[in-house]
Image (spheres, rainbow, N blue to C red):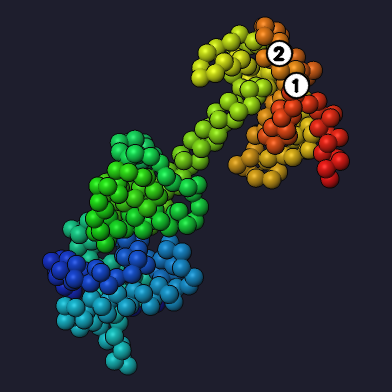
């Protein structure tokens, strides 16, 4: 049986020395270098490989991890005057300042020094695994609901917004940049939203930051779709959207008068005709994927406002699915154009 070779620093610094040295080099550390320490801290037994760290941090190859991990060790050693382990060729094992190295048949393992782990905890650059496990969507929702700002200026989430969120988080924790009350109290952006969460939750691994972002991004998108749906129902009063039965026409007063409508009638119409526009055949699900699945307007062939009395809707005879564009064009004419007439217009325009 081949025994694993162990490479261990002979003069491991104390926790206070790690805290002092890391504090001194903080401004010179890259985001990746911090992430490497965080991801290793959260690894089982704080032991991992360069390959696993590359996967966890999203870098292209383990060689990138080896270089960043070693450079960070050298930066620390030069700061506090520490001599790292040497190889036979007299080159330095800069990584040894962070970990014990194990050469095994399964690969080269890095086991983080206990002193490094305690220093990261003292610096609040990580949160203990038990505490991190308590972070949940309920926690994220509660933090968000307690925020104060004049208006939400965020744009729809994407990879760039995710990066802005992470930068804001790390500005609050690693870089300790102070945002002014004016910045925080006026417009909500993805950057200062990350900053706010960083202040509340402290230093976290990149994977945890992205977990929080994905929760907030989904919440944003869900609210956007709901808001858009509410706005559409006001722009197009013939959209079937709310009531309890197929009987329609009872007026309710909001900002303008609107007619109560039945979601069951809408669904019956869609079940019969499908989700493609009856005029141009556009299908939101086919074009936009998951975001567009199930979305379509439902048009009353005879506007309820013209009837002005309660009547029983026949979802097959009285309703048709149409896209918002065609729906808008139908109602540009008074009375609304017929489905057949719109098809003729569309054919001629092509």
Local secondary structure at mark 1: loop
| Residue 343, percent from left and from top | 83, 34
| Residue farthest along the bottom direction in this orientation | 89
Residue on which disc 1 sits: 335
Q: Residue at point 86% right, 40% down?
A: 347
Residue 206: quadrant of the picture? bottom left
| Label 2, residues with CA under 10 Å away: few <14, some 14-19, many ≥20 | few
| Residue 60, percent from left and from top | 49, 70
| Label 1, residues with CA under 10 Å away: few <14, some 14-19, many ≥20 | few
Horizontally, is 238 left or right of 44 in the view? right
Residue 203 sits above or below residue 93 on the image:
above
Horizontally, is 304 left or right of 8 in the view? right
Q: Which mark is residue 306?
A: 2
Q: For the image shown, how many numbered marks are present on the structure?
A: 2
Residue 47 sits above or below residue 326 on the image:
below
The residue closer to the viewer here, 86 or 291, is: 291
C-beta proximity under 8 Å, tags 2 and 1? yes
Q: Quick one: label 2 or label 1, which is nearer the N terminus? A: 2
């Amino acid at each position: 049986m081949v025994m694993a070779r162990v490479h261990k620093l002979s003069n491991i610094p104390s926790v206070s020395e790690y805290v002092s040295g890391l504090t001194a080099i903080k401004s010179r550390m890259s985001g990746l270098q911090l992430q490497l320490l965080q991801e290793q801290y959260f690894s089982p037994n704080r032991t991992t490989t360069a390959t696993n760290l590359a996967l966890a941090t999203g870098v292209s190859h383990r060689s990138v991890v080896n270089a960043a991990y070693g450079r960070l060790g050298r930066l620390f050693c030069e700061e506090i005057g520490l001599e790292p382990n040497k190889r036979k060729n007299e080159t330095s094992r800069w990584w040894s300042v962070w970990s014990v190295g194990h050469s095994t048949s399964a690969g080269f393992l890095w086991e983080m020094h206990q002193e490094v782990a305690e220093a990261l905890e003292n610096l609040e650059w990580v949160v203990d695994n038990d505490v991190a496990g308590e972070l949940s969507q309920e926690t994220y929702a509660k933090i968000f609901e307690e925020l104060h700002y004049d208006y939400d200026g965020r744009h729809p989430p994407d990879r760039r917004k995710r990066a802005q969120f992470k930068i804001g988080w790390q500005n609050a924790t690693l870089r300790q940049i102070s945002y002014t009350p004016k910045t925080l109290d006026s417009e909500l952006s993805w950057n200062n939203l990350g900053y706010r969460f960083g202040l509340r939750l402290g230093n976290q691994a990149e994977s945890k930051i992205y977990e929080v972002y994905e929760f907030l991004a989904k919440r944003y998108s869900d609210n956007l779709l709901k808001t858009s749906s509410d706005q559409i129902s006001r722009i197009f009063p013939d959209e079937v959207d709310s009531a309890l039965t197929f009987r329609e026409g009872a007026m309710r007063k909001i900002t303008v008068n609107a007619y109560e409508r039945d979601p069951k009638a809408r669904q019956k119409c869609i079940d019969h005709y499908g989700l493609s526009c009856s005029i141009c055949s556009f299908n939101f699900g086919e074009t936009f994927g998951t975001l567009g699945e199930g979305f379509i307007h439902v048009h009353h062939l005879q506007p309820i406002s013209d009837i002005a009395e309660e009547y029983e809707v026949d979802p097959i005879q009285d309703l048709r699915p149409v896209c918002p564009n065609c729906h808008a064009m139908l109602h540009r004419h008074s009375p609304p154009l017929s489905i057949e007439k719109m098809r003729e217009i569309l054919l001629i325009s092509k």
